[in-house]
Structure formats: structure tokens, C-alpha cells
């Protein structure tokens, strides 16, 4: 195992030298790219020492180094690990010039500069820039960049970097050159370069002052026809940020490039966003309705970073949630405003519970602002992103939309052009609103999902509610977190008779509501007003009232999910469960056509893992079986009604498809409807319907599944994101076997160098908890072996795939021990620091 060097938040120190200007010259060639770097630096007058640290890695081969006009002999250079330390520099202003050579074609880690389908492409966040050149690679150093790119004109006609194109000309020997200048000072992680044979589509956005922004999306020539949706989404994002937050695009050219081999989702490099192609390319033939929504939100997310991330960036990487939590919150609001706020909230909470809650309960748990890390790349987590967004949402819940906007505007004005901290954000919000927000601070430093216990008591003076918070964070000095609780009471006439928001600021508080009715249903955490687990002994009657008569979408959905989970976990007889389960359908089946997308969610039962983790029932096999049987029972009982709804939604929009396909999931459990599923597959005119049918066929183990899968691959071989779906679907089946896994692993379409494809196999297996938890000794070892294989190629991706090993605590002790022993054995081998950090913390 490599030595793991931990870096601590408390050790932050400002640098001795700032960089004011960077000039980079690239002479591109697949195996030998030459980089020349010129830095202008000035002394930070606030520190006394005079050391310049230039971070580097084993991948960049240093050829020369000069300080001012003096060449430094390579042998005289002092290294600490791979970093160059230049000590006792006496000048307050200095120039450093260096040159080095790169091998982009062999950069399989996809960090720094690499080749993807013959396109030169960079990926620098957080610390990839040091793979490109030696540089003080930290986000608090912000400089102006000029970039010269020289390449072969025939193979690399397009040369892109950040900012404005200031010169383009032909050179001798078939070469050409482009010069880009970015007037905005930026941290190195926002640097980007793309060069290759790309096509593009373009449009423009007109800003409020009438000036245009030129928008372009670049992709492979045969893919540019699939960029139109993304381009429209970009325009919508620009308009929305103007309308909602008065934030206007500050660059005159805004470029997006779609790249097939990409470690992350997308990257907000200043004026040159680089995207994982799967979040750009779409048309209804290859993308589902859900894919379109995801693409729109990610296009928005990267654009929104331009203010929250780029204009104001983070001082150090511990503060990552400052920009990611905030920007996720902003993209959630974008989708909510453009689409359906209630449904978006339900989707986001589902995600949070499926991924972030387990992380927060597992061995890799950390606060949204971590205290230490070994590899920062391991901290791009759902905690920093999604829980971070929930914490940002708390401010809005407390301050209202207007107050939140005031706070955000103040924050951006105050810190524009600088690198800030999470504390700066909190203080800005408080200052702008003249509010004390000190109790939010602990959300940044304490890990774990808080639990809120609620008790309801009928008293002489009204209904008394007692709220108590329990934290599961480590540490002796835990502080109560401020928890906004939106709640309502539904009275005996099925109407909301009281609603309010209570802010729980201490460990335990009570309030008495002036309410004389006694038979009321208490609806808690409406709109999921805080990322907590709620302990309240709802009665069946209360849940039913909320599910049917609440006005809050989230609360209705939540109550129904709870009702079903509790029903499955309860000790009632099978007959009682069946009867109770199907009783509400009479009404639901009548109503559902009025709000198809919402009822589609309503009809979708909580998954087995969420039932297991929210109820007392821990027997997964039993949950799985009963859940399936209930669906089948409801399908059988109301077969005619289901069919009628199914047929009524045949021609329609995305919400009709939502409802139709949720109904298909019921019908698909009946043997006589295998043919309904197969017919839908065949007749589908879009990916949403085709995929829904294929999924229903595979997940219900239909006899037709094999044929459909073969047909699907044949049809869509040319579309990588669709082939990813083909892999992931098979791997997410509860019936997955080792044989199928091995077949897929050695399939001609598998590619261990493409992160999306790797995730569609190994990532999907890590998510298939039904399979993992039922046959742990079969699947975990297979997963581990394959992660070790990927680690040799791409450590970042491998480390991310290893998170299931930090969440073993649900398993039988003997299974846990066996798997941890395997992990221990692997730690003795050669592995990357990325993977070593994740695995060793999992033990
Ligand atoms: N900053 C990117 C985002 O959240 C994520 C990312 C991190 C992409 C690192 C690439 C590399 O939008
Ligand atoms: Zn982001």
C-alpha cells in the first residue's frame, strides 16, 4: 500500500507568492506534447517566508527551469515528493519559465491532458493541472491566462481554450496556431484545452443590455445533430439566472465540448465547459425523458458555476461544498422553476436517501466540509454535493426566496474575483438579512444524518408537539443543528387546518398549537424541509389522510411510501396486507389521469433497500418477495383498469409516458402480459418507451428478455450511452449471476478504458444491493477483483467504484469479516493512493 499523507483543513496557509499572469504554449502531439510555461509572480506581503512551491507529478517530464534570467540546473532542483520547492527567493516580483513534455496518448487516468477518440482534452479539477505543468496548483491562486496552441491543422483543425480567441494563423509544415486570452483571473483547476477534429452547432443568447453571447457546442462531426437539445438548455439556463438571480453571463463566447472518455459528469472551465458526451448528446431516439431532464440540469449546473464557482471560487478544497452545494441547489431550483417543483423535490429526496444517507451512515462518512483528505478527488461525494445543496436550501427555507437572493447577491458582490470559504457564505447570508444564522454552522462540521423524534400530545391548551434531535456524528462536543420543520395538521374534515415552520434550535423543544380538534393527522417535514430522518409513530389513518389530502407533493408521496413500507414490515397476515394494499387503488386509478407524472411516482413502490433501512424488517429476501407479490396482486385485481389507463396514455407527452410505463410495471408481473411488454418494445417510437419495456422484461425475468436484449444491442451499437444502458440494465437485475457478469466483462462492447462503460458494469453492480446483500460472498469478491483491474488504468474511477465496501455493516458478521479480509489482502498489493484511501477507510 502506498503511504497515505493526510492533509488537514486546520493547516491551511496562504501561499508566499501569488501568480498574476500565466502564459502557456502547447505544441500538441499524441506522445510528445511540449509545454512551455511562463509565470509572473509577486510576493504575498502577508507571509514572511519566501518559498515558491510548484506542484508536479511523475507524469510531466521537466526539461528546463529558469528563475528570472537565470537557468536552474535540473540536478540542483529540490523536490519534495514530486513538488519543486524554490526557497529564499529574494525578489518581490519574479518570472519563472519552464518547459516539460507530456504523453497524452498514454494518459489512461484521464487527469491532466489526454486523448479521447483522437481529441486532445484536459481535465484539471481539483489537482490535475499539475499533470500538465509545474505550478502552484491551489484554488486560492488566481491568475490571468494566455494560451498558445500549436497543432497539425489536418488532424486538429479546432483549437480551443478559455476566454477569447485573439489570434489564429497558419504556420509552416502543416501546423497552425491559436492564441486564447482569458481576462478573468482564475484558479488553475478551471484551465481547459481542447483540440481535434470537431464539428459544432451555434446560436446566441441576448443579454439584458442587448449584447449577444456566442454559444457553441462542439462534438464529433457525426454527433453534432444530437446537440440541439443541450444548446436550447444552455439558453434557458442563461435566461433563468438573469430572471431569478440577476446574474448575467460575463463572457462573449461560451463553448461546450462533448467528450466520450471523461471521469466526471461535466466541468465548468471558464468559457469552455467540457462535458461527458452522455450529458450532451440526445434525441428522442436515444435518450429517455429522464435523460433530457438530466441533461438540462447539468448544462444548467455548469453554467451556474460561472458565478458560483468561477467568479467566486473556493479558498481550499475543504470548502468544495461552497461552490458545489450552492450550484446543485441552483440547478435544482432551475429544474423546479422550469418543470414541476413538487416532482423535482421527490426525485431529489429519493436520490439523497438512496446514495447520501448510506454514505453518511457508512465508513466514508464526512461532514459537507471535510476536516482532512488524502486524495481530494475522493471527496467529490454525494455528501459534499447533495447534502451540501440541502444545507444551502435551509437558508432559503429560513429566509424565503427574496432573503436568499439578497444574501447570494451580497456574497457574490463581496467576494467577486476572490477565493472564499463556507464561513464567508454563512456570514454573507446573515449580514444581508440582518439575521443570526450561527446555528447553521454545525451543519458544516458534523457528519451523519440527524434524527428528529417527534411526539404529539393532546393537552387542554391544544396540540403539543415535542421535537428532539439526535446526532450520530463522532466527537464529544456535538452542537445542536438548526432544523427547519415545515408541518401541517389535517383536520377531521380532511382539510389543512394549521400550517407553520418551526425552527428547532436546541436539543429538544416543545410547542403548543392553538388547535381544539383532536383527531388530526400531523404532516411533518413538508417539502422535505431538512435532510433528516424522522421518527414519529404515524398511524395508518394519519398516513392515509396525508397521502390523499395533503397539498404538498412531497408529503403525499412520502406518506404513501411509508404506508407501504410499514405494511410490508408489519406482522399482519398476508391476506390483511393484500387487502390493505389494494384498497386505495380504487380511488387512485380513477384520479391518476389528472396528474400522470405524480401518480406514476405514487404507483412506484419503495425499493427493497429503502424498506429495509426505514423499517424494522431486515430480511431482504422476504421484503423482495412480498413487495413483488403485492404488485402482482394489485395488477391482477385491477387488470382491466390498468389496461384501460395504459391504453389511454398511448399517445401523449412525457407525463403520459411516465404513467403508462409505471402501469406497465404492474402489468408486466402477469404472465399474460409478457406480450404487452414485448409489443411496446417493438412499437416504441422513442427511447423512453423502448427502455421501459426492455426493463420490465428483464426485471421480471420474461422469456422474451433475451431476444429483446439482443435486438436492442444490435439496434443501438453505434450509440455509446445506449450501450451503457444495455450493460447497466442487465447488471441491475436482481437475477444477475456471476456467469452473466463474466460474459459482460468479456463482451466485445466492454471497454475498461471508458469510464462510462466501466460504471455501467461495475458501478451498476455496486448499486445492485438486492443482489449484493443476498449473495455477498459471490458478488463482492468479483467486484473487488475488477476494481483492482481498473485501478491500474484509472485510479479515480476505481476509487469511486469501491464505495460499496464502506457500506457492509448491513451484512451478517461472517460475511462482513470475509469481505474485509479480502480488502485487507488487496491493500497489501500495489494500488493507487486513491483506491488505498477508500479501501483502508472501509476497514
Ligand atoms: N466541478 C464539476 C461539477 O460539479 C465536477 C468535476 C470535478 C468534473 C472534477 C471534473 C473533474 O460540475
Ligand atoms: Zn459542480
Image: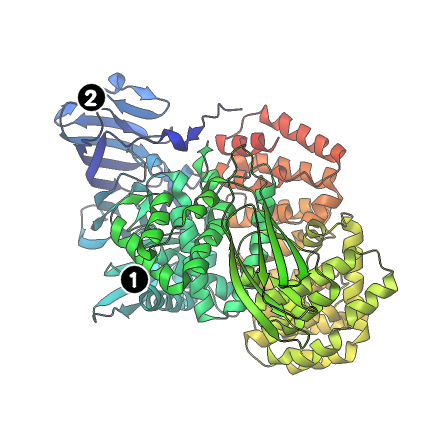
Question: Measured along the vertical axis of the image, is residue 243 above or below residue 594?
Answer: above
Position of residue 303 in the picture relative to residue 439 (left or right): left
Label 2, on which residue?
72
Distance in Å between CA atoms under marks 2 and 1: 47 Å
Location of residue 574 in the rendering, given as x and y in whole percent from the top left corner: 86, 61
Location of residue 285 in the rendering, given as x and y in whole percent from the top left corner: 53, 69
In the image, farthest residue toward the top? 76
Dot 1 surroundings within 10 Å: few (below 14), some, or many (20 or more)? some
Image quarter of residue 30: top left
Which of labels 2 and 1 is toward the front?
Answer: 1
Label 1, on which residue?
247
Image quarter of residue 703: bottom right
Question: Measured along the vertical axis of the image, is residue 64 above or below residue 358?
Answer: above
Image quarter of residue 22: top left
Q: Which of 156 and 821 is in front in this view?
A: 821
Q: Quadrant of the N terminus?
A: top right
**Among the two numbered marks 2 and 1 on one chain, the one whose residue lies closer to the N terminus:** 2
Q: Quadrant of the C terminus?
A: top right
Position of residue 782 in the picture relative to residue 439 (left or right): right
Total tally of numbered discs in the picture: 2
Q: Do the residues labelled 2 and 1 touch (CB within 8 Å)?
A: no
Amino acid at each position: 500500500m502506498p503511504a497515505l499523507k493526510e492533509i488537514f483543513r486546520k493547516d491551511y496557509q496562504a501561499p508566499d507568492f501569488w501568480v498574476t499572469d500565466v502564459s502557456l504554449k502547447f505544441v500538441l502531439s499524441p506522445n510528445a506534447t511540449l509545454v512551455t510555461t511562463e509565470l509572473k509572480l509577486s510576493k504575498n506581503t502577508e507571509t514572511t517566508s519566501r518559498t515558491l512551491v510548484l506542484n508536479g507529478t511523475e507524469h510531466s517530464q521537466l526539461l528546463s527551469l529558469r528563475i528570472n534570467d537565470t537557468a536552474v540546473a535540473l540536478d540542483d532542483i529540490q523536490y519534495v515528493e514530486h513538488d519543486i520547492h524554490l526557497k529564499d527567493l529574494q525578489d518581490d516580483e519574479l518570472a519563472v519559465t519552464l518547459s516539460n513534455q507530456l504523453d497524452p496518448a498514454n494518459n489512461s487516468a484521464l487527469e491532466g491532458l489526454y486523448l479521447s477518440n483522437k481529441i486532445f482534452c484536459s481535465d484539471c479539477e481539483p489537482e490535475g493541472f499539475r499533470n500538465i505543468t509545474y505550478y502552484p496548483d491551489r484554488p486560492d491562486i488566481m491568475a490571468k491566462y494566455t494560451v498558445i496552441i500549436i497543432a497539425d491543422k489536418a488532424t486538429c483543425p479546432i483549437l480551443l481554450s478559455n476566454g477569447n480567441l485573439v489570434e489564429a494563423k497558419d504556420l509552416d509544415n502543416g501546423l497552425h496556431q491559436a492564441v486564447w486570452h482569458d481576462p478573468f483571473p482564475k484558479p488553475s483547476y478551471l484551465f481547459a484545452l481542447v483540440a481535434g477534429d470537431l464539428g459544432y452547432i451555434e446560436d446566441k443568447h441576448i443579454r439584458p443590455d442587448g449584447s449577444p453571447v456566442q454559444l457553441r457546442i462542439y462534438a464529433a462531426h457525426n454527433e453534432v445533430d444530437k446537440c440541439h437539445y443541450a444548446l436550447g438548455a444552455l439558453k434557458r439556463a442563461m435566461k433563468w439566472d438573469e430572471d431569478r438571480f440577476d446574474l448575467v453571463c460575463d463572457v462573449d463566447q461560451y463553448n461546450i465540448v462533448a467528450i466520450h472518455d471523461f471521469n466526471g459528469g461535466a466541468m465548468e472551465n471558464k468559457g469552455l465547459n467540457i462535458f461527458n458526451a452522455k450529458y450532451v448528446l440526445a434525441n428522442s431516439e436515444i435518450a429517455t425523458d429522464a435523460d433530457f431532464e438530466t441533461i438540462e440540469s447539468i448544462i444548467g449546473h455548469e453554467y451556474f458555476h460561472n458565478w458560483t464557482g468561477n467568479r467566486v471560487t473556493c479558498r481550499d478544497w475543504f470548502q468544495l461544498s461552497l461552490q458545489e452545494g450552492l450550484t446543485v441547489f441552483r440547478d435544482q431550483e432551475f429544474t423546479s422553476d422550469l418543470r414541476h417543483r413538487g416532482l423535482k423535490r421527490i426525485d431529489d429526496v429519493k436520490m439523497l436517501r438512496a446514495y447520501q444517507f448510506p454514505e453518511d451512515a457508512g465508513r466514508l462518512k464526512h461532514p459537507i466540509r471535510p476536516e482532512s483528505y488524502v486524495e481530494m478527488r475522493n471527496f467529490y461525494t454525494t455528501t459534499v454535493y447533495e447534502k451540501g445543496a440541502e444545507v444551502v436550501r435551509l437558508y432559503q427555507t429560513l429566509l424565503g426566496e427574496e432573503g436568499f437572493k439578497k444574501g447570494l447577491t451580497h456574497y457574490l458582490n463581496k467576494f467577486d474575483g476572490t477565493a472564499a470559504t463556507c464561513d464567508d457564505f454563512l456570514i454573507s447570508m446573515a449580514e444581508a438579512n440582518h439575521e443570526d444564522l450561527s446555528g447553521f454552522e454545525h451543519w458544516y462540521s458534523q457528519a451523519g444524518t440527524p434524527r428528529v423524534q417527534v411526539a404529539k400530545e393532546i393537552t387542554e391548551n391544544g396540540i403539543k408537539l415535542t421535537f428532539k434531535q439526535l446526532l450520530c456524528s463522532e466527537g464529544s462536543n456535538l452542537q445542536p443543528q438548526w432544523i427547519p420543520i415545515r408541518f401541517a395538521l389535517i383536520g377531521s374534515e380532511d382539510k389543512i387546518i394549521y400550517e407553520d415552520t418551526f425552527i428547532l434550535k436546541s436539543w429538544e423543544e416543545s410547542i403548543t398549537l392553538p388547535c381544539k380538534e383532536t383527531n388530526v393527522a400531523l404532516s411533518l417535514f413538508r417539502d422535505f424541509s431538512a435532510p433528516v430522518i424522522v421518527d414519529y409513530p404515524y398511524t395508518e389513518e394519519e398516513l392515509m389522510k396525508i397521502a390523499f389530502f395533503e397539498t404538498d407533493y412531497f408529503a403525499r408521496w412520502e406518506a404513501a411510501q411509508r404506508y407501504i413500507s410499514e405494511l410490508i414490515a408489519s406482522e399482519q397476515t398476508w391476506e390483511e396486507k393484500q387487502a390493505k394494499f389494494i384498497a386505495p387503488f380504487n380511488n387512485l386509478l380513477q384520479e391518476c389521469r389528472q396528474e400522470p407524472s405524480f401518480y406514476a411516482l405514487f404507483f412506484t413502490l419503495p425499493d427493497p433497500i429503502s424498506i429495509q433501512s426505514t423499517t424494522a424488517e431486515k430480511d431482504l429476501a422476504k421484503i423482495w418477495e412480498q413487495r413483488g407479490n403485492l404488485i402482482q396482486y394489485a395488477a391482477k385485481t385491477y387488470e382491466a383498469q390498468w389496461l384501460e389507463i395504459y391504453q389511454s396514455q398511448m399517445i401523449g407527452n412525457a407525463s403520459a409516458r411516465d404513467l403508462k410505463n409505471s402501469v406497465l410495471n404492474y402489468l408486466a408481473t402477469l404472465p399474460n402480459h409478457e406480450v404487452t411488454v414485448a409489443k411496446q418494445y417493438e412499437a416504441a417510437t422513442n427511447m423512453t418507451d423502448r427502455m421501459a419495456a426492455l426493463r420490465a422484461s428483464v426485471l421480471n425475468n420474461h422469456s422474451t428478455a433475451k431476444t429483446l436484449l439482443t435486438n436492442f444491442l444490435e439496434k443501438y451499437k453505434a450509440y455509446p450511452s445506449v450501450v451503457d444502458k444495455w450493460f447497466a440494465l442487465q447488471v441491475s437485475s436482481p437475477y444477475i449471476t456471476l456467469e452473466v457478469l463474466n460474459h459482460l466483462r468479456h463482451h466485445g462492447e466492454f471497454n475498461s478504458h471508458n469510464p462510462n462503460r466501466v460504471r455501467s458494469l461495475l458501478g451498476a453492480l455496486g448499486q445492485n444491493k438486492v443482489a449484493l446483500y443476498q449473495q455477498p460472498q459471490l458478488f463482492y469478491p468479483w467486484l473487488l477483483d475488477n476494481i483492482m483491474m481498473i485501478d491500474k488504468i484509472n485510479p479515480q474511477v476505481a476509487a469511486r467504484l469501491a464505495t460499496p465496501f464502506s457500506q457492509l455493516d448491513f451484512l451478517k458478521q461472517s460475511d462482513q469479516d470475509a469481505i474485509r479480509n479480502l480488502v485487507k489482502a488487496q491493500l497489501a498489493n500495489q494500488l493507487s493512493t486513491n483506491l488505498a484511501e477508500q479501501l483502508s477507510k472501509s476497514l
